[in-house]
Image: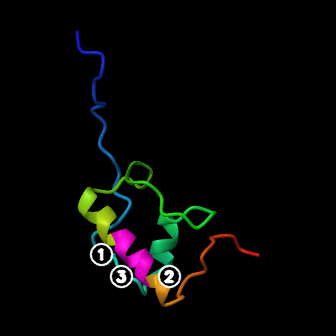
Amino acid sequence: MNKFKRSPRRRSPSIRSDETIDYKNTSLLRRFVSEQGRILSRRMNRLTSKQQRSVATAIKRARVSASPPFSNSEN
């Protein structure tokens, strides 16, 4: 018997097809950063590995250019 069965439900995509992953798109990138400012994991984001790599690169570029704050808290 196989203990580990995958659920047949489809995942809802967290990035729509009309959204582009870019370091200037801070509203999109904020969804993938925790309150402490860490990049969320691929499982939590429901992204493919290719999308996760591009999101991580975009977040790192945005941090260097100081587009978003390092932490996600709204003080």
Amino acid type at mark 1: Asp
Question: SS for tag 1?
Answer: loop
Magenta segment boundaries in residue numbering: 55-61
Colour pattern: rainbow
Asked which quadrant contains residue 19, the reply is bottom left
Q: Nearer the viewer, mark 2 or mark 1?
A: 2
What residue is rendered at 52% in x and 71% in y? 30
Which residue of the protein is positioned furthest toward the bottom in this rendering?
65
Inspect the image, locate mark 3, and give the three-letter code of the amino acid beneath it: Asp
Mark 3 crowd level (few <14, some 14–19, many ≥20, 10 Å Cα):
some
**Residue that badge 2 annotates:** 63
Say which mark, if any, is on residue 22: 3
Residue 45 % position (x, y) = 42, 55
Q: Position of residue 33 (x, y in %)?
A: 52, 65
Q: Secondary structure at mark 3?
A: loop
Q: How many marks?
A: 3
Classed neighbour count for the residue bearing mark 1: other residues with Cα under 10 Å, few (<14), some (14–19), many (≥20): few
